[in-house]
Image (cartoon, grey):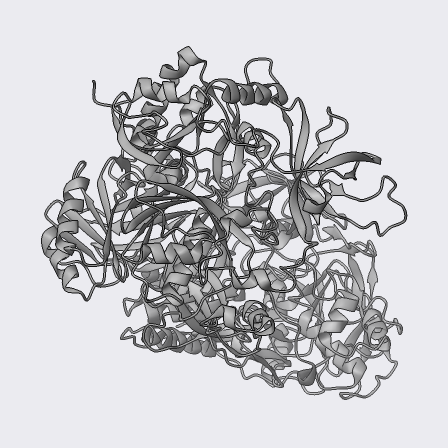
Amino acid sequence: MMLIPCPWCGPRNEIEFHYGGQADVRCPADPQAVSDEDWATFLFFRDNPKGVFTERWSHVAGCRRWFTVRRDTDSNRVLPSEGTQQARTVTT
Amino acid sequence: MAEPYAESPLATYTDVLERSSVRGQLRIAEEPFLAQVTVRVDPKSPAAERVGTALGGMLPNQSGEVVLAGDLTVLWLGPDEWLVVGPEGRDRDVQERVTAALDGEHGAVVDVSANRTVLSVTGPRARDLLNKGCALDLHPRAFESNRCAQTMLARAGVILVRRDAEAPSFWLLVRSSFARYLADWLVDAAEEYRSGGGEP
Amino acid sequence: MSNEFRLADGGRIDRDRPVRFDFEGQQLQGYAGDTLASALLANGVHRVATSNKYGRPRGIMAAGAEEPNALVQVEAPFPEPMLPATTVEVRDGLQASGLPGKGRLATEEDPARYDTMHTHCDVLVVGAGPAGLAAALSAARSGARVIVADADTEFGGSLLGSGQTLDGRAATDWVRRTTAELAEHPEVRLLPRTTVFGYYEDNYLVALEHRGDDASSRQRIWRMRAREVVLATGAHERPLVFSGNDRPGIMLAGSARTYVNRYAVLPGRRAVVFTTNDSAYAAAIDLHDAGVEIVAVVDAREVVSTYWASLCVERGIRIHASTGVVSTSGTDRITSAHLSSLGPEGNHPTSVRQVVTCDLLLVSGGWNPAVHLHSQARGSVRFAEDIGAFVPDGTDQAARSAGAVTGVLATGKCLTSGAEAGRDAARAAGFDAELARVPDSKHAPILAARHLWVVPGSGDSDGTTQFVDLARDATVADVRRAVAAGMDNVEHVKRYTTIGTAHDQGKTSGTLSTGVIAEVLGVGVGELGTTTFRAPYTPVTFAALAGRERGDLYDPVRVTAMHDWHVEQGALFENVGQWKRPWYYPHSGEDMETAVLRECYAVRSGVGMQDVSTLGKIDVQGPDAAEFLDLVYTNKMSTLKVGRIRYGLMCTADGMVFDDGTVTRTAEHRYLISTTSGGAANVLAHLEDWLQTEWTHLRVHLTSVTEHWATIALVGPESRQVLADVAPELDVDNDGFGFMTWQEGNVAGVHARVCRISFSGELAFEINVPWWYGREVWEVLMAGGRPYGITPYGTETMHVLRAEKGFPIVGQDTDGTITPHDLGMSWAVSKKKDDFLGKRSFSRPDTARTDRKHLVGLLPEDTNLVLPEGAQIVEQPELGEPPVPMLGHVTSSYRSAVLGSGFALAVVKGGRDRVGETLYSPVGDRPVPVTVTEPVFYDKEGARRDG
């Protein structure tokens, strides 16, 4: 049972959270202006690294806030981060 | 016309909860019909200050902080979200006061009085009982009086409030549809104390 | 046969509390404090079980959880299929038999209760042997919150069975005093009979407490979050590999010592001791002093310890250096050991042999630190040459190891390392901890051990009776075969041979198998490493893991304010997510089909009422609420006027339908939106996601109010009259209360929001009152509707009615691959808005295909037939050779009262272009013909909605 550091409520058990996949996958500002290929890349393609991964979590059983976490996918350890890490992009 | 009949989510559980209490050890009861109003406002805005004043205290700005303001209890639920809990029937007054204090600035005031009901769990066994289904550290060193947390109790989401005056005392705010499940769970978890440890 | 092997005094059993138990039909006696194994040995029973592959007789090898052999089936007090006799406490009425290879699950329901407790501590000490107790003492005195867990019935670990002294007194005195002090500390929790079996991320450890059959719960799972962990898990003695090393009467030397000292049991009368290291000498001395004849100590080393040699000489015990036991005789019990002198390490032995009769053979191949939990926590291990085993080598968790698990075997060093670890752990947790004083212990000089993986010159040269893993009946021959097949690492050999995969997870065989594999491969043991250690450390029942989350508490049952009424009226219920919703209300003698046809008819011809409180409700507030809803719904919500309601579809960014519901504008900057019953939480999370991360400029707040409202759908041509009677203040006329508008007013004396929306095509009102008044208003409406024949109806009738109108249900007629256009709902997709979620995806090549699956209606040619939901749709009446091209499938299917036939909704490739065509659906053994239709079956022109 991992502890996920909610920037608002503090560390809580992972079952209180909803996972949101890779962070910082920016939705194109004007979706109508991008090519089909770029749009598909935004919708469907994500990194899957072994090592440090920046990802989104939402504290659904708590304050319902979305935030980002850096986690080492190899050791499954959450890496320390500074301050509140409000998530900046959405999950599709 | 007669006053319409209101029924709290655990109205039919009064006896069951009473029976599952253990004198001197544990008391479980519903505190029905409490007024509950959700308040959303930017905590750094002047409006937030006005809202605090209107409620008779400051809006708590620390995670899990609880502020008591007269007969109102203000729970921190998120960085810009609070739940004001008060005696039955105070919902309209609280909404009006907060709305007036917002004075047109962006915020939200929602009556959620019937959305959740409140269970009080009191007594020396309260902490053990809750920790059968709650993974939070409820030791007084970690979860002091007048702290609250939104978390899971067994499989239901709850707002947990520690309200110790003398004996350990908790409020569980649970969504009305989950109230019976949670009451069933509490009664089941309390069985251990009924069959053994209680004073006669 | 009554305790003839029990010593007259000594031991930690309670001689005042004899217990009677049954083993394989024999009534035997033991004492409180005995394990089943010690009680059996006291009665001279060595053969306990039969091995599962070769059916060989097996005895008691160990005295703890590492036991590979002595598995029993417990029949009473409750059947349990496979327990090591060494971990079963004897009690009156215990009934057990040796495991005949495989266990047998109980056929009756387990009446016992199992539960769970979450807890937190500053320092968790795993293991209460000398190191663990010393650690706990250092930590506890600092005021830290400490938990000490140990699998055994009492604390003390190796000190309970070693008979040694501390500070010149019995070591058990120190254990008693230490345990008593710990129990006095208010922030210390002592958990005997508790096995920590799993070590997960962020110092989350899970333990199983055996609380006993008389406790409020038989077993309790502890879920513990520790700031710091001290692993004082000790070590397991390693057996030796020689021919016939599996016979009953062959026992680990340290375990034999435990039987003598702790249980006052002689495991035999005439013993041979075979060792590669010093530790077995202590066993030889203790057994001798207790009255066992030690015929020979057989030491594989050329040079033996002078310290131990002199103690042996004093007792007339003969030591054979450079010698090994190469084979044994006996069937149900060992009768002799065959000795052969061993050459120096690596050399072949001479063939000189000596046969020694005995009824007990003690073996010691060294000690394996119990690194399981350390390793589960992703700590690394290294091969320690001095002890010939793997020891912890660092971890990223806030944990430290102490005592024998680190490879130190002398009691004094275990105590010191424990005290230090406890102090360090408490300090790391922020406490001002001091080193607890540890008692003085006598310590013998330790002479280096010989690492002997396979005893050379064994009687059986093919290795078929040289057992590496007794629990799995896996031998040196199996390892050789694995290596010959090309396996060259321990993980592969493990899977090929099954070594280490039994109930004991290789506690005695793990390191041994690495050594044997290394020897066969001709490489170093350290190079090969260990297999991965995984939870659980010892077997855990599913019942314990489930705890109280079974039966009614398995998952929350969500109910509405009107639930009891539905129950009283005999409704049957359907699970919708976690909700219990009335499915239909059968009258006596009615089956489901009859009841549903009756309910449908009542709604279409008179008036019906449904509890729709389960629909999700979200309050949307803020100056940008309209702009926000324009972005999340496919249609335009900003143009909705206050007082009006609009149906809305939500898509995800990929253009697929995500949820649907109504949007009610309650004020200029405020809306109330509804979601599907099962989708409420997901919709809120989805909306918060976009609001918080992409559209942070929008001033909008979302609040879930699902349970604040009890919601009643009053439906049918007579609904207006019923409402008018019950809510005389409301203007219910069509002109005053138009379709898709709402009003506030008193209904049955309760302030309500009433909406004119319809999910059936009939005139309908949706009445919302605070939860508390739900049942009252419901009953008043029922009473008011009685003159009109008001009929309560459930979800099944609702499904039929909406399907007759071609209204899809998200999650039933859609599955995440269906767009609004696929549903034929392009009318709900705005062409005017610049953007909304999903819009860009509608022009993706795949989404824009014209041959996508469309929602259509199907009418079976046989009007009596109701197609099964999920049935495939094919082109031809004959299926032909596979693969048969599938055109789609049935998503909803019912019998219709108004149509007088079965009908269905389906998604079919290019379906809208196939209206009128005959397709086929394989039902039973052959495809049946169906006609493709528009999805709207009833009241196509919508004449009925205004009554």
Evaluate whether residue C451 shows in this view: yes
Residue A62 on image: x %, y %: 36, 56
Residue C173 on image: x %, y %: 40, 63
The mark total stands at 0
- Identify the image quadrant of the N terminus of chain C: top right
Residue C285 on image: x %, y %: 60, 70
Residue lying furthest top in this view?
C787
- Is residue C579 rendered to the left or right of residue C381? left
Residue C576 on image: x %, y %: 52, 39
Residue C577's place in the image compared with C746, above or below, is below
Residue positioned 55% across, 76% down in the render: A74
Residue positioned 39% across, 72% down in the render: C167
Q: Which image quadrant for residue C240?
A: bottom right
- Is residue C192 rendered to the left or right of residue C731? right
Nearer-the-camera pick, C815 or C565: C815
Nearer-the-camera pick, C261 or C8: C261
Residue B21's place in the image compared with C851, above or below, is above
Evaluate whether residue C147 shows in this view: no
Residue C844's place in the image compared with C741, above or below, is below
- Is residue B186 rendered to the left or right of residue C912? left
Residue positioned 30% across, 34% down in the render: C743
- Identify the image quadrant of the C terminus of chain C: top left
Nearer-the-camera pick, C154 or C172: C154
Q: Which image quadrant for residue C686?
A: bottom left
